[in-house]
Image (spheres, rainbow, N blue to C red):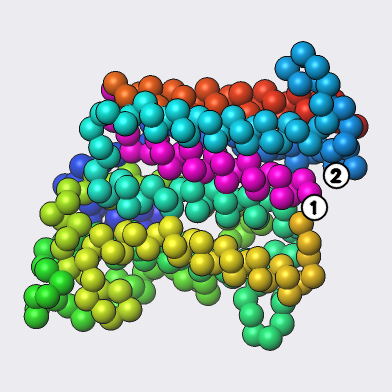
Amino acid sequence: MTMLDALLLDLTADLTLRPLAPGILAARADIRAAVADLATIPDAALDDPWNWSGTGMSETRFAFYRAYETLELAAADAEAAVADGPSRPSAVRLIAPATAARWDLHGLLHGISDADWDTDPGDGEWTIRRTIAHIIGSQHSFAWGTAWWLRQALWADDPSLPRRVPAEFLAALPNEDTEDLAGIRTEAAARLDALLDLSFERLAGLPDDMLALGARYGGVPVSVGFRMGRWSSHIREHTIQVEKTLAMLDRRPTEVDRLVRLVLGAYGRLEAVVLGLPTQAGGATATAIATRAAGEARRIASSAAVSAP
């Protein structure tokens, strides 16, 4: 546990926690394995035959779309499973889109070479490493800063609302200059996952009245809920920045790169549906649907990778 982890745990010690369901962790393991298999298939093999479910031949390209369709259908089934049950708390619904954004970013990073991670695009623009470090550092600020504002227990229109988080508190948070991403893509992805998961566990259980408490964003008085709703859009914002950087480097994704991102994006939308659901009744059913779908995507990917040259 890092000093920052301990700080967040202390600031949120009296809040209701929402740890990730074991089924989600199992689904993630399967989807990562699926992508690892799919990524071994070269573009040149996409037109080659693939024995779909042992019932007939199709092209290998279709395996990617079958994995995608499996995950998309599971998202619809999971939504239906909880339609008549208790709705997820507002805090969960605010945060859940961030997991869809996270997996789309993973899909983009998956196709980036280690060399391009630190290639300077010129014109004063950031490297991809620096952009990802900024995403991670900002997520620290979103979570830890939000926890600090919660402790103030003031409304946004309260004249005593502090102008900013104390400088000594902010100094402990990493940013794009101080976030140490010693590894390449896998290290960054793992760190972002761990941070988002911890942030979710500590803050997704907030009741609605606490979401309405005051905070600041860019010096402007806002609610705590506003800050939490920024998680997703901030990741999307800098995913676009990475795309622009790749364009500046004249790097074009392969078809397999695009298909892998498609699959990971579909999984992210599925995870966003089941994140934070209760562990009983419809919630358990929906999570089980997600787990089975990820397992099926893994079997599809394994089959395609075996048949490809």
Task: Estimate the x, y position of residue 247 in percent, counting from the top left.
Answer: 73, 70
Is 219 above or below relative to 238?
below
Residue drawn at (13%, 54%) of the image: 209
Q: Nearer the viewer, residue 31 or 137?
A: 31
Residue type (three-letter) at the residue carrying disc 2: Asp
Task: Estimate the x, y position of residue 252 in percent, counting from the top left.
Answer: 78, 61
Overall secondary structure of the magenta section = helix
Q: Quadrant of residue 277?
A: top left
Residue drawn at (59%, 29%) of the image: 70
Q: Nearer the viewer, residue 264 or 76?
A: 76
Query: Residue at label 1?
Result: 254
Instruction: Report if residue 81 lies within the magenta region.
Output: no
Query: Residue at label 2?
Result: 43
Question: For the residue carrying disc 2, how many other residues have a C-alpha within 10 Å: few (<14), some (14-19), or many (20+)?
Answer: some
Question: For the residue carrying disc 1, how many other residues have a C-alpha within 10 Å: few (<14), some (14-19), or many (20+)?
Answer: few
- Whether residue 70 is visible to the viewer of this picture, yes or no, is yes
- Quadrant occupied by the C terminus: top right
Q: Is residue 8 left or right of residue 237?
A: left
Q: Earlier in the sequence, mark 2 or mark 1?
A: 2
